[in-house]
């Protein structure tokens, strides 16, 4: 067996174990046979396959997702983390190498900076909610998830496939404010093509929720002079959260 085939078989086995843990042996894919091309049965949710009523149900619904190519190469689903009833929700672009390995958003260098940004307004990662436009790692070379520097932005069809999950996630969390990080997140949630430099620092409306676009922490790592703008944006968010407490 080639190395890439072995990696694929291991990932497939991992998915099966995840689902078995969640649903019990009788409810998992009828065909979890590693190395076969047998078709998967649909994954059931505890709400009987209807609309997920909780974040856990939504996450369960996404476990075997292969709505786009990213579901086939990812190591872990990076669903989101934080308080399911958070007043403030951050939305980034998509998981990178570190996030794919840990199954948690923003845990690499950009994530460490995001943690500091959150703490700068007196909050913690546990008190906010952090998610991404896409829940699986977009890779330049999808055959090698172990390669660093293999990250890319999500393609439009990948973002479109994943957007309904984010929309549901936002609906369930019902935050007071959404803060989008970088171009992609603002573009997909607001449908705006204008660059982040032009739109950041102002509140917009996303389905009756206030949305503030700001720079992505990865941009701050490349260009630290942008930090002061993000600080200004965070102060506006802090003040708005206080008014709505
Ligand atoms: N960049 C993102 O947009 N999201 C992550 O989760 C990590 C890095």
Image (cartoon, rainbow, N blue to C red):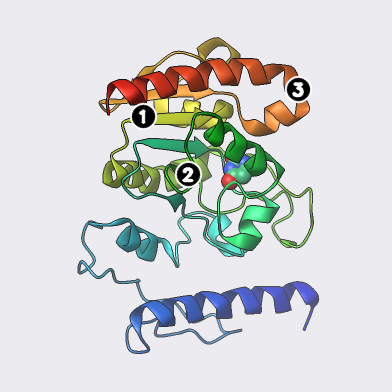
Q: Residue at x 77, y 28 (%)?
A: 222
User: Which circle's residue, 2 or 3, is located before the other in the chain?
Assistant: 2
Binning the other alpha carbons within 10 Å of mark 1 as few (below 14), some (14 to 19) or many (20 upward) gives many
Position of residue 205 relative to residue 4, above or below, is above
Q: Which mark is residue 149?
A: none
Q: 72 and 234: which one is in front? A: 234
Label 2 lies in ligand 1 vicinity (Cβ under 8 Å): yes
Quadrant hosting residue 214: top right
Residue 110: image location, x then y, percent: 67, 39
Query: What residue is pinned by disc 2?
Result: 130
Q: Is residue 166 left or right of residue 110?
A: left
Q: Are marks 1 and 3 in contact (CB under 8 Å)?
A: no
- Residue 170 seen anywhere in this rendered image of the structure: yes
State the separation of the CA atoms marked 1 and 2: 12 Å
Q: Which residue is mark 1?
A: 177
In the rendered structure, the answer to whether residue 30 lies left or right of residue 96 reads left
Q: Could you tell me which residue is drawn at 48 percent across and 33 percent down?
A: 122
| Ligand 1's quadrant | top right
Q: Nearer the viewer, residue 98 or 112?
A: 112
Kindly give the residue lying farthest to the front in the view shown: 122
Look at the image and tell me in which quarter the C terminus lies: top left
Secondary structure found at label 3: loop
Query: CA gap, disc 1 to disc 3?
Result: 26 Å
For image coordinates 69% across by 57% down, the residue present is: 142
Q: Position of residue 139 (x, y in %)?
A: 68, 51
Residue highlighted by disc 3: 223
Q: Tell me if residue 110 comes above or below residue 221 in the rendering.
A: below
Give the vertical position of 159 relative to 105 (above or below): above
Residue 62 sits in quarter: bottom left
Identify whether 76 is placed above or below 223: below
């Amino acid at each position: 067996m080639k190395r890439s085939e072995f990696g694929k078989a291991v990932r497939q086995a991992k998915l099966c174990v995840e689902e078995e843990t969640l649903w019990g042996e009788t409810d998992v894919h009828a065909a979890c046979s590693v190395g076969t091309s047998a078709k998967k049965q649909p994954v059931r949710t505890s709400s009987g396959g209807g609309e997920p009523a909780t974040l856990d149900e939504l996450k369960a619904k996404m476990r075997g997702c292969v709505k786009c190519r990213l579901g086939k190469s990812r190591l872990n689903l990076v669903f989101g983390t934080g308080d399911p009833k958070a007043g403030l929700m951050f939305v980034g672009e998509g998981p990178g190498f570190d996030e794919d390995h840990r199954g948690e958003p923003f845990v690499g260098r950009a994530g460490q900076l995001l943690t500091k940004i959150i703490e700068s307004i007196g909050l913690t990662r546990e008190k906010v909610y952090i998610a991404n436009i896409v829940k699986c790692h977009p890779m330049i070379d999808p055959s090698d998830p172990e390669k660093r520097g293999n990250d890319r932005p999500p393609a439009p069809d990948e973002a479109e496939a994943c957007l309904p999950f984010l929309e549901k996630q936002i609906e369930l969390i019902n935050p007071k404010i959404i803060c989008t990080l970088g171009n992609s997140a603002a573009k997909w949630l607001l449908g705006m093509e204008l660059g982040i430099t032009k739109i950041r620092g102002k509140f917009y409306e996303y389905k009756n929720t206030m949305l503030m676009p700001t720079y992505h922490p990865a941009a701050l790592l490349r260009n630290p002079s942008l930090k002061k703008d993000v600080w200004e944006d965070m102060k506006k968010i802090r003040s708005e959260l206080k008014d709505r407490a």
